[in-house]
Image (spheres, rainbow, N blue to C red):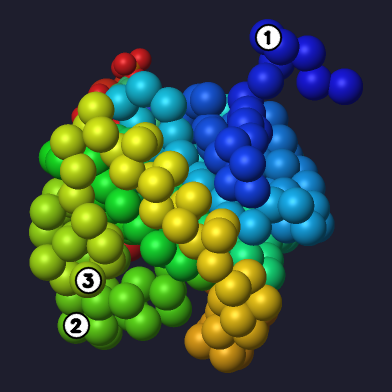
Amino acid sequence: MTTAEDAAVSTTREGAVATVTLLRPGLSVAVKTQLRDALHEVAADPSVRAVVLTGSGRAFCFGQDLAEHAKVLDAGASTALSTVTEHYNPIVVALATMPKPVLAAINGTCVGAGLGFALACDLRLAAAGARMGTAFTAIGLTCDSGLSASLVRAVGSSRAAELVLLAETFTAEQAQGWGLVRDVLPAAELADGAAALAAHLAAGPTSAYAESKALMADPHLVEVLTAEGAAQARLGRTADHHGAVRSFLAKEKPSFSGR
Ligand SMILES: CCCCCCCCCCCCC[C@H](O)CC(=O)SCCNC(=O)CCNC(=O)[C@H](O)C(C)(C)COP(=O)(O)OP(=O)(O)OC[C@H]1O[C@@H](n2cnc3c(N)ncnc32)[C@H](O)[C@@H]1OP(=O)(O)O
């Protein structure tokens, strides 16, 4: 039973629209398990005909909570890897396959698995100036959350390679120019804009949306997620990854040996 102070994710309803909000930007185990369970709940509820995924405050999602992750790595715990199969993958599959439209309202910084979640949604709106990025290689990892395929499908292989290998952040406005984001709104108008679009979708032909999502979905999503998990398992044991996480938390520039 999640008490109010433990809540890391909230679900609110407005008619047939459910809004799932990340209350903390770092993906701790609490955030990931509550997000996974919340998405399974709204996916299974026939009275929910459209879903909005958003964050709170200045950030949408910072990706893996690196402070928590460092403790798990230091303990040599295999739970570090199980989070991919127990949390990240089920969240992405729920977003990408639930039989109703899912809209990401990117209220602020969106990086790492946060970007993967946003790209697993069907449509994206973003707040002006929101920064996005892949982040993975900057900490000695590679893509997960389906991003190795969803980013290529969204922006093409050339730009996807640039975004992953250089791990530079980009703006909501750039993302809109690349077709990653449908619209960029002033931060104060994002929630209302997302609510209006979600209400429009919730009043639409839900079965037709569900069939369209199924036809347009990546037929290789499960294979992609499996391959990403295997790559993270290899990279998660490297000195580069362990060192980069420590450097990030110490607010130091990481150095990489290449292994
Ligand atoms: C031993 C057995 C091992 C077996 C192998 C297992 C390993 C397999 C791997 C499993 C895990 C996979 C994880 C998965 O790939 C998911 C991911 O998302 S990986 C990517 C994680 N995210 C990041 O690396 C992003 C890091 N953050 C940044 O780059 C920047 O902070 C930003 C997000 C671009 C924002 O930049 P700014 O606006 O400049 O803000 P700050 O940098 O000052 O940050 C503000 C504040 O937030 C804190 N913070 C930011 N990001 C994180 C984070 N990810 N985790 C924790 N904390 C974060 C930052 O420290 C600042 O804190 P403050 O200084 O204010 O206290």
In the foreground, 45 or 138? 45
Asked if residue 187 lies left or right of residue 8, the reply is: left
Q: Assess mark 3: CB under 8 A from ligand 1?
A: no
Give the residue type at disc 1. Answer: Glu
Q: Is residue 184 above or below residue 77?
A: below
- Report the residue marked by disc 3: 179
Q: Does residue 245 appear in this view?
A: no
Residue at 47%, 52% (x, y): give it: 198
**Quarter of the view holding residue 166:** bottom left
In the foreground, 64 or 50? 50
Q: Earlier in the sequence, mark 2 or mark 1?
A: 1
Q: What crowding class fits label 3: few (fewer than 14 Cα within 10 Å), some (14-19), or many (20 or more)?
A: few
Residue at 55%, 60% (x, y): give it: 203
Instruction: Specify the label residue 251 is tagged with.
Output: none
Q: Quadrant of the image for the C terminus? A: bottom left
Which of the four quarters of the rendered structure image does ligand 1 lie in? Answer: top left
**Quarter of the view holding residue 62:** top left
- Asked which secondary structure carries label 2, the reply is helix
In the foreground, 112 or 251? 112
Q: What crowding class fits label 1: few (fewer than 14 Cα within 10 Å), some (14-19), or many (20 or more)?
A: few
Q: Residue furthest right?
A: 1
Q: Does residue 11 appear in this view?
A: yes
Measure the C-alpha gap from mark 2 to mark 1. 44 Å
Q: Earlier in the sequence, mark 2 or mark 3?
A: 2
Instruction: Specify the label residue 158 is tagged with.
Output: 2
Q: Are marks 2 and 1 in contact (CB under 8 Å)?
A: no
Residue at 59%, 36% (x, y): give it: 14
Instruction: Specify the label residue 5 is tagged with.
Output: 1
Return the x and y of residue 157 as percentages of the image width and height.
26, 84
